[in-house]
Image (spheres, helix red, strand yellow):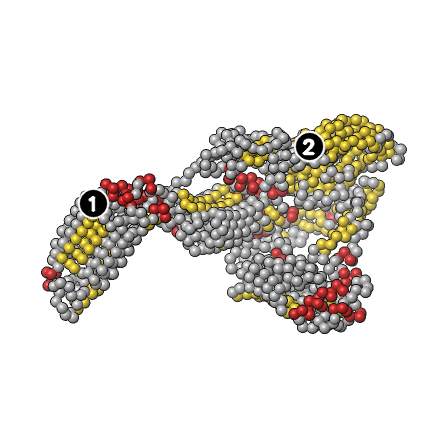
């Protein structure tokens, strides 16, 4: 018969025993079982071999006298927790052969008489610890043939009458959490089915009851720890190692994050893999316990929006040393407990506003060594960094050049500027360049009047159309990321040259069209990397010569168009004739234009032997690829070819300018103001010839045009150049301030947002409504400024109110009601006691001592000396005591800068010594009191970003300048006074406003901008300067930041990270049996290795190579300019090698030497004579 049971289940029964008569009767019992059926089932219900899929709530409540229920061999997958409620007399419950996966909590509660429980041949995955708590009478329990992986200790404690237990054919994980079961079965030998282990591999198929306690070990203790709560976690991912709650998948070459990471994971190590992009697929949201995520040293180029949504407990996220290009405002959503974020060593150029707003717990942000472009789009970031005061490595500007290496938080807001070639902000996801249309992976920018290839073309672009524009140059950096590009159309532009490696990364490009441009030059390696290129069109250009091998990398080429080009067909183009004849990739359209005997001949059909060199190629043709054939350099300058058909003139000493057209003399840089012309009077001196309307020593004074003005109503006249302007008092306007402003009228009411305007005759005020402020009530007051939102909630500002948007499971008006969470994380400290003043203490592996790793800029055993500084602001400077000039003054500065102007050093008032950067050279102004002042400029350029050594020596009237140990240059401030007398402070790197104003107005300095860069070392009179003792340090920072070449700060941090890790094995001193030679010092490093710290001059892995530094004597005249010593002197030079140090004089003797000059003058000079040479650390 067919029966629908009282709880709404379809039951298909078969004739069995004598319960129901045979027949085809259908029962529909949706409200209650028929009374005659109840009588048959008063104590037994046999419903086996039907199609029952569910046992609902209180299914047998009407049959409390039931003693036996058989529901075997059905399709039951769901059982209500109170399905068997009230069956206190039940002794047998048969449920085998179903599809039960879960036994809900309390399902067997109250079955105190149950003696037989058969749950075998189901799909049960777990048993809650209290599942059998009321089954005191149970004698046989079968869990045979299920999917149970573990059982919690105490699961069978309440089974006081148990005699038989079947546990076989379950995939048991025999770890430390199942050790109790072996002990239980030893004490109670009731398991008769032969239960065996399934994992780990060493325990596979071994009988549980026969195993000793020590065999049960845990590598993944947390996987089965909560088996009694039905929480069986994933196994450790393949190839990874798991220790406690730490999952280590580092260094496995992974291209994707494993999907089966255990839920218990608190620390996930994925560093040193090949992960490319973090996807928003909910992976991290499924790891609720994750608190530390290490993704360093991968290939990560982007993080999709909401990738970390749900991973709210992460407090440390490491993304250093990847390839991230930008930070967008949805990259870190959901991480409201994040405290440490490391993004060092990426390729980040910009940060989108609001990117960190929801990281309410952030206290450490590392952004060092990223090429931030400090244009107008990054101005907000400076203010944000100042307001937050976060710890960590601060970001610096990489460009533009004028602010390079300046800390972003120190840069004034007005310095963040956008120019026509620097107007790129963060593009974010789904970006399409302006004036272009993007459909799928096709980007069309045709006929858009573009003058350059747009930035930010989507990296997945397959076809790019830039035809019919005004593009003049192909910027390789704008297209190099288009790895999927197959077609590029640049036809009908103004492109003049194809430079080397322009398309090097476009390995999938099959069609390249550059026809109808102004191409004159194709460089030898311009098409390198185009291994898939089939079609190349260079038709309709001005190409005359093509270097041999230009097309050699085009392995897939099938068609090339070279027609309508004035090809010069001499022997240098013979290779092209041979090449096109091999596969006929050129259809015969290309023809020769020169020389005359080859005019109009086809490249394809003309015999290669006709391509001959019989005459000289004209400079006009050669100049198409090499601008030096236009011979631009003057006055003996040498021309050097530069990329993009540019050139650079290497000027002869004494000349400067793009074409070496100007002499370096007293008029260098035109010291005259307001368009005046400079006239050289004699060596080192000049005068200014003023234009009409100006006067003064430098033509600096403008004629006062306010002498007769028309300003009214007490307006202030402001003098301009050949004009003036009236600055109106409050309440007036007009060219001459002749009109009164009609405040608070319909024509002039500046108050906004329904504010009330109040006229005060000469001014007005606005009375703002609640929620607004500002002079014109235009600012909505930020009510979130002092909000009370808690637990990572987002404050949403309203008008005169705010609301809290709760994160995760938090609730309440201020999100103050928290879910139950717990978090533990170990805290360790490598150094408890140390005396490192400005540095970090660490203890090398295997060593009983500690070392001080100095912070940038500091030196000394305990990092107690401040010896290098970065000058980061336009008002930076350091104040020192006055320079001692008797018997002489000797100042050496080792510095690096990319800025062309800035103050290096200044001391004096009327008499002075001023040293500054001017147009990339060093300018010296020296005045001991003999008018006029003496001026000179270095021939060397020093604003190239690398370190230079500048020596400044003042001996009486003589001043000597030497750059990078090159030739010395001297000037003499001739006159009656002999010595420079100084009593005012000496300033380095800049100058305060008041002495700066005086120096500028007296022409001591040409520019008051502070030096921007790093002073690595400063020596004054043979003593190194400790800036920690300086009178004043104004807006400077310790260390040289990214300019440091000896050791990168980031490498130091990484080394420190390695050194503070606990060793995996007991420490062994690697220096016990070291091989260091020549009294070098053995220094332990990580991984139980060591390095040899050599004495000065020695080198080699074990310091086995000795120095060759020695004294080389000679006898010769001492010469200086046009002067020489009266007789030959016995002198010496230091020569030879000293490894990483320098071979210099260790001992010298000073003697007075009489100098005679060609013009008859004589003077005496102190000269250092080398007595002994040795290797020294300082090279200057």
In the rendered image, the vertical position of residue 836 relative to residue 181, given as above or below = above
Q: Residue at x 62, y 67 (%)?
A: 557
Q: Is residue 120 above or below residue 532?
A: above
Q: Is residue 469 above or below residue 702?
A: below
Horizontal placement of 1034 versus 6: left or right? right
Q: Secondary structure at mark 2?
A: strand
* Mark 1 residue crowding within 10 angstroms, few (<14) / some (14–19) / many (20+): some
Residue nearest the observer in this picture, 425 or 1008: 425
Q: Which quadrant is home to the N terminus?
A: bottom left
Asked whether 546 or 957 is in front, the reply is 546
The answer to whether the residue labelled 1 contacts the one labelled 2, judged by CB atoms less than 8 Å apart, is no
**Where in the figure is residue 719, as x and y percent of width and height?**
71, 48
Q: Which residue is mark 2?
A: 1175
Tell me if mark 2 has few (under 14), some (14-19) or many (20+) residues whose alpha carbon lies within 10 angstroms of its own.
many
Quadrant hosting residue 18: bottom left
Residue at 51 percent of width and 36 percent of height: 1088
* Earlier-in-chain disc, 1 versus 2: 1
Distance between the alpha carbons at the discs numbered 1 and 2: 86 Å
Whether residue 445 sits left or right of residue 995 in the image: it is left
Q: Position of residue 361 (x, y in %)?
A: 45, 44
Q: Locate residue 159 relative to residue 607 in the image: left or right.
A: left
Label ID, residue 159: 1
Q: Secondary structure at mark 1?
A: loop
Rendering quarter of residue 422: bottom right
Quarter of the image for the C terminus: give it: top right
**Residue at (65% x, 35% y) in the render:** 1105
Q: Is residue 231 visible?
A: no
Residue 130 visible to an observer of this rendering: yes
């Amino acid at each position: 018969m067919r029966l629908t049971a009282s709880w709404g289940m379809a039951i298909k029964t078969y004739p069995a025993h004598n319960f129901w008569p045979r027949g085809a009767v259908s029962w529909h019992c949706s409200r209650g079982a028929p009374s005659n059926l109840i009588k048959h089932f008063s104590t037994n219900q046999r419903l086996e071999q039907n199609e029952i899929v569910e046992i609902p709530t209180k299914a047998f409540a009407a049959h409390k006298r039931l003693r036996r229920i058989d529901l075997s061999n059905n399709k039951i997958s769901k059982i209500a927790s109170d399905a068997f409620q009230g069956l206190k007399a039940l002794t047998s419950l048969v449920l085998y052969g179903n599809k039960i996966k879960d036994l809900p909590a309390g399902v067997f509660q109250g079955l105190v008489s149950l003696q037989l429980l058969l749950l075998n041949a189901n799909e049960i995955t777990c048993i809650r610890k209290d599942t059998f708590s009321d089954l005191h009478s149970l004698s046989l329990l079968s869990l045979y043939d299920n999917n149970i992986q573990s059982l919690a200790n105490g699961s069978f404690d309440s089974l006081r009458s148990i005699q038989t237990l079947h546990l076989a054919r379950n995939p048991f994980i025999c770890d430390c959490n199942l050790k109790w079961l072996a002990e239980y079965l030893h004490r109670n030998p009731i398991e008769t089915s032969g239960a065996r282990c399934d994992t780990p591999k060493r325990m596979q198929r071994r009988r549980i009851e026969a195993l000793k306690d020590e065999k049960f070990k845990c590598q993944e203790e947390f996987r089965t720890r909560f088996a009694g709560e039905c929480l069986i976690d994933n196994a450790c991912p393949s190839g990874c190692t798991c220790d406690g709650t730490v999952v280590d998948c580092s260094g496995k070459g992974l291209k994707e994050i494993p999907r089966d990471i255990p839920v218990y994971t608190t620390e996930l190590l994925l560093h040193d893999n090949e992960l490319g992009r973090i996807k928003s697929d909910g992976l991290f949201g499924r790891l609720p316990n994750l608190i530390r995520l290490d993704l360093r040293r991968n290939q990560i180029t982007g993080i999709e929006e909401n990738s970390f949504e749900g991973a709210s407990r992460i407090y440390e996220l490491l993304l250093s040393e990847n390839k991230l290009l930008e930070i967008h405002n949805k990259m870190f959503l959901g991480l409201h407990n994040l405290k440490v974020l490391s993004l060092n060593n990426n390729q980040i150029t910009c940060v989108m506003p609001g990117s960190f707003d929801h990281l309410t717990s952030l206290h450490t942000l590392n952004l060092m060594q990223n090429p931030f472009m400090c244009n107008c789009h990054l101005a907000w970031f400076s203010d944000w960094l100042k307001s937050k005061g976060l710890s960590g490595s601060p970001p610096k500007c990489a460009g533009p050049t004028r602010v390079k290496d300046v800390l972003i938080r120190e840069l004034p807001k007005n310095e963040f500027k956008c120019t026509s070639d620097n107007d790129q902000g963060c593009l974010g996801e789904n970006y399409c360049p302006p004036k272009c249309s993007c459909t799928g992976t096709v980007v069309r920018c045709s006929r858009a009047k573009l003058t350059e290839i747009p930035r930010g073309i989507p990296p997945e672009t397959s076809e790019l159309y830039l035809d019919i524009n005004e593009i003049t140059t192909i910027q390789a950096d704008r297209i190099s990321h288009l790895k999927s590009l197959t077609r590029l159309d640049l036809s009908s532009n103004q492109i003049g040259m194809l430079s080397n490696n322009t398309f090097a990364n476009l390995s999938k490009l099959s069609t390249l069209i550059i026809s109808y441009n102004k191409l004159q030059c194709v460089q030898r390696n311009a098409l390198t990397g185009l291994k898939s290129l089939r079609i190349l069109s260079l038709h309709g250009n001005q190409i005359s010569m093509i270097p041999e091998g230009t097309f050699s990398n085009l392995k897939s080429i099938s068609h090339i168009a070279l027609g309508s080009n004035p090809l010069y067909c001499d022997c240098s183009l013979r290779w092209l004739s041979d090449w096109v004849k091999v596969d006929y990739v050129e259809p015969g359209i290309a023809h020769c234009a020169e020389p005359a005997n080859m005019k109009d001949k086809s490249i394809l059909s003309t015999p290669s032997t006709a391509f001959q060199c019989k005459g000289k190629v004209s400079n006009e043709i050669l100049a198409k690829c090499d601008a030096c054939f236009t011979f631009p350099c003057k006055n003996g300058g040498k021309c050097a070819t530069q990329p993009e058909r540019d050139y650079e003139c290497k000027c002869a000493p004494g000349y400067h300018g793009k074409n070496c057209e100007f002499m370096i003399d007293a008029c260098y840089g035109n010291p005259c103001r307001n368009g005046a012309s400079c006239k050289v009077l004699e060596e080192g001196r000049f005068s200014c010839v003023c234009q009409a309307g100006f006067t003064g020593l430098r033509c600096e004074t403008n004629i006062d045009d306010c002498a007769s003005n028309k300003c009214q109503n007490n307006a202030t006249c402001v003098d301009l150049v050949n004009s003036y302007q009236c600055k109106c008092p409050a309440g007036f306007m007009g060219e001459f301030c002749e009109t009164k402003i009609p405040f608070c009228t319909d024509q002039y009411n500046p108050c906004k947002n329904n504010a009330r305007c109040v006229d005060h005759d000469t001014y007005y005020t606005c009375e703002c409504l609640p929620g607004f402020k500002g002079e014109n009530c235009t600012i909505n007051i930020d009510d979130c400024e002092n909000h009370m939102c808690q637990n990572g909630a987002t404050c949403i500002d309203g008008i005169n109110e705010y609301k809290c948007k709760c994160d995760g499971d938090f609730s309440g008006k201020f999100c103050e009601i928290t879910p139950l969470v717990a978090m533990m994380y170990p805290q360790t400290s490598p150094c408890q006691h140390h005396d490192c003043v400005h540095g970090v203490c660490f203890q090398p592996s295997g060593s009983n001592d500690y070392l001080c790793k100095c912070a940038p800029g500091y030196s000394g055993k305990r990092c107690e000396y401040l010896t290098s500084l970065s000058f980061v602001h336009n008002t930076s400077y350091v104040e020192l005591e006055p320079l001692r000039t008797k018997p002489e003054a000797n100042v050496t500065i080792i510095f690096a800068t990319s800025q062309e102007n800035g103050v290096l050093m200044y001391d004096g008032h009327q008499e002075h010594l001023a040293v500054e950067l001017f147009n990339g050279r060093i300018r010296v102004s020296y005045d001991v009191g003999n008018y006029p002042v003496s001026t000179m400029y270095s021939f060397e350029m020093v604003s190239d970003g690398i370190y230079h050594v500048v020596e400044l020596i003042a001996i009486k009237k003589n001043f000597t300048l030497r750059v990078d140990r090159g030739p010395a240059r001297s000037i003499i401030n001739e006159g009656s006074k002999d010595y420079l007398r100084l009593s005012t402070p000496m300033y380095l790197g800049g100058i305060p406003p008041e002495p700066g104003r005086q120096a500028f107005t007296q022409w001591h300095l040409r520019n008051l901008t502070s030096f921007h860069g790093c002073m690595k070392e400063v020596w004054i009179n043979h003593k190194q300067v400790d800036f920690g003792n300086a009178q004043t340090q104004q807006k400077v920072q310790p260390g040289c930041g990214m300019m440091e070449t000896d050791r990168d700060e980031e490498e130091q941090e990484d080394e420190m990270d390695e050194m503070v890790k606990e060793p995996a094995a007991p420490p062994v001193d690697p220096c016990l049996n070291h091989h260091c030679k020549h009294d070098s010092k053995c220094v332990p490093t990580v991984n139980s290795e060591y390095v040899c710290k050599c004495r000065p001059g020695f080198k080699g892995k074990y310091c086995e190579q000795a120095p060759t530094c020695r004294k080389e004597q000679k006898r010769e005249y001492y010469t200086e300019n046009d002067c020489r010593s009266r007789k030959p002197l016995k002198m010496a030079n230091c020569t030879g090698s000293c490894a990483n140090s320098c071979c210099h004089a260790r001992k010298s003797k000073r003697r007075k030497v009489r100098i005679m000059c060609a013009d008859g003058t004589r003077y005496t000079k102190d000269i250092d004579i080398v007595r002994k040479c040795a290797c020294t650390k300082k090279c200057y």
